[in-house]
Amino acid sequence: MKASYRIMDKTTDQIYIDKVLQGETNAFAYLVNKYKNMVYTLAKNILKNNEDAEEIAQDSFLKAFQKLDTFKGESKFSTWLYTIVYRNAISMIRKNKIATSDIDNYVIDNYSSGFDFPQIEAIKNGEQKKYVAKAISNLPETDAFLISLYYLNESTVDEIEKITGLTKTNIKVKLFRLRKKLYNELSLLLNDELKAIL
Amino acid sequence: MEKDSKNIDKIIQENLDIKNPSLDFTDKVMQQVLTSEVNEEKALTSLLQKHTLETPSLDFTSKVMLGLPQNSSAFVYQPVIGKKTWYFISLIFILLVIYISFNLDTTPKQSEILIPYLIKIKSIFSFNMPDILTSPLFALSMFALSTLLLIDYFIRNRRFS
């Protein structure tokens, strides 16, 4: 079911891509509307800042439009688009010298979460969103990006490899460690969620 | 005393045997571990999907669309009068100017010949216009309307360029 939905989704995207390539610029609005939230979220996960994220998200769509003729349809349009977002955001970080460590070889264990927001309070006050967002924003740039791709976009490891250029093994190790990290930090919220699911 | 203690140890060791659990014990444990992992994974996915998708500003799409360069192939306008026609018209105009300039000192007699033709041409184009069309108010309105249309044209052109 999910696979057929993805195939249909890919075909729909291709219809609009073809329209844009034939000179129907307005057809691009369909792709912008469809992917803007994910693009913005991914950009924000890396840049940790609303203004920069919006700028990079817009710039990524512009680049995608300009390079649309180079998109061969071998992968999903979203995979191709998120590759642009990733490279754009990383280059902005490097330009602004925000990053202080080698992002690609980041070791997950050498950061502290700095959590001071009590989970029990979050559950009581219905501030789960704020709490989860804080947990994500505390992750290093590329790790937050990986989490969004894997859990929000439900990208496969192969797709993440194409987008980030990281090796499959590296991605799997990172995801495993991140999963454990998030389980610990969001344990109370997860128990609540687990009760709701089961 | 020490000998007794050793004997007791021996008796205990001999009588203690390792109890075997059921044959599918490992499977059951692994099943539980996997189920727990799957459930945790589901809960994490659900929690993250509910709470981490961000939205950009409301006018995001329009900002992106305005920033796009217009596809040149879609906006190629062909001129109504072609280049060759313009060259032809220019050539005729130049020839006419040259002809007139060489015949400026025409005798009154020659110009008199033209007068009946000019009168004829004038009579073709002369007709009585309604008063409203000749009023200054009409002229002013037409001028204002034309100016507005021209401004509108330039504004639209600037937006799309």
Image (cartoon, coloured by chain):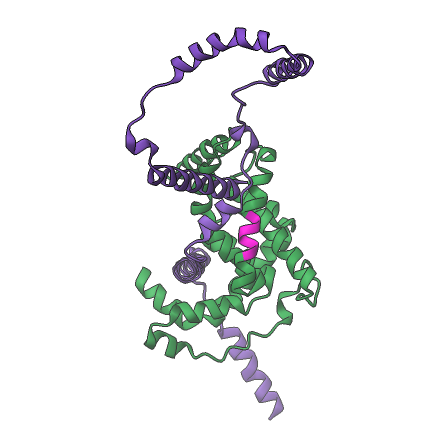
Chain colours: A green, B purple
Along the viewing direction, whichever of A36 and B146 lies nearer the viewer:
B146
- Farthest bottom residue? B1
Where is residue B141? Give x, y as percent: 36, 40
Q: Is residue B135 above or below residue B102?
A: below
Magenta span has A57? yes
Magenta span has A110? no
Q: Is residue B81 shown left or right of residue B62?
A: right
Along the viewing direction, whichever of A63 and A190 lies nearer the viewer:
A63
- Quadrant, the C terminus of chain A: bottom left
Where is residue A159? Give x, y as percent: 56, 45
Q: Is residue A108 above or below residue B81?
A: below
- Farthest front residue? B108
The answer to whether one can see residue B17 in this image is no
Q: Is residue A62 above or below residue B39?
A: above
The answer to whether one can see residue B50 in this image is yes
Q: Is residue B95 above or below residue B3?
A: above
- Quadrant, the N terminus of chain A: top left
In the image, what residue occupies the spot 56% across and 82% down? Answer: B9
In the image, what residue occupies the spot 62% across and 52% down? Answer: A88
Q: Which residues are magenta?
A: A55-60
Along the viewing direction, whichever of A165 and B111 lies nearer the viewer:
B111
Residue B31 lies in what quarter of the image? bottom left
Along the viewing direction, whichever of A81 and B66 lies nearer the viewer:
B66
In the image, what residue occupies the spot 54% across and 59% down? Answer: A53
Where is residue A100? Give x, y as percent: 69, 68
Q: Is residue A45 shown left or right of residue B35?
A: right
Q: Is residue B32 shown left or right of residue A114?
A: left
Q: Main secondary structure of the magenta part?
A: helix
Where is residue A176? Give x, y as percent: 55, 59
